[in-house]
Image (cartoon, helix red, strand yellow):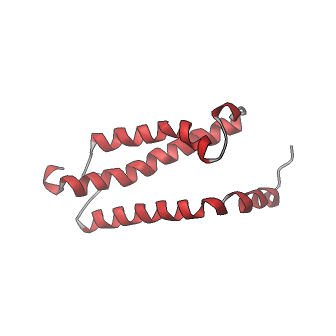
Amino acid sequence: MNFSISGIVAVLTQAIPPFLPLIFSLLAVLILVQLTARVKHYATSGHHCLAAALMAVLAGASAFWWLPLLTNSRLAFVSTVTDWAALCLAAVAIAIYAWLVLNPLSYLLRGAHTA
């Protein structure tokens, strides 16, 4: 198979637009939570919440189930190394996103005095 940059761009221009509302809403939630927490003196290195970390890992692990459903596929169709790599990287990205939202959210809900 010979992949070209123009071929990849053509596929992406067709694949991404249906997910733009979801992407923008997730980005808005991330920015809102981060900015609100940072205004209240949140620092990533200064606040650690085990529950937020565990929930982020669970969110990443659950991606193996719901991410194929989101794309109208099934886990059985993930067959090549490239497919598995993409799914694994998406699961890691979801876990990181969840932690970036849940950790400052736990700071806001628990307050700075319990950090």
Which residue ends up furthest to the right in the rendered image? Answer: 2
Image vertical order of residue 74 relative to residue 44, above or below: above
Quarter assignment of residue 58:
top left
Relative to 24, is 29 on the left or the right? left
The answer to whether any part of residue 44 appears in the image is no
Residue at 53% of width from left, 42% of height from top?
A: 91
The percent position of residue 53, horizontal first and vertical second, equals 34, 42
Q: Residue drawn at (15%, 50%), measured in percent from left and top?
A: 114
Which percent across, then down, holds residue 35?
Answer: 34, 67
Q: Residue at x 28, y 40 (%)?
A: 50
Residue 78 percent location from the top left of the image: 68, 34
Q: Position of residue 37 (x, y in %)?
A: 28, 62
Q: For this view, does 22 lie left or right of residue 54?
A: right
For the question of whether residue 30 can be seen, the reply is yes
Q: Is residue 70 above or below residue 104?
A: above
- Is residue 85 shown above or below 12? above
Q: Is residue 41 left or right of residue 14?
A: left
Q: Nearer the viewer, residue 63 or 113?
A: 63
Q: Nearer the viewer, residue 107 or 25?
A: 25
* Quadrant in the rendering for residue 52: top left
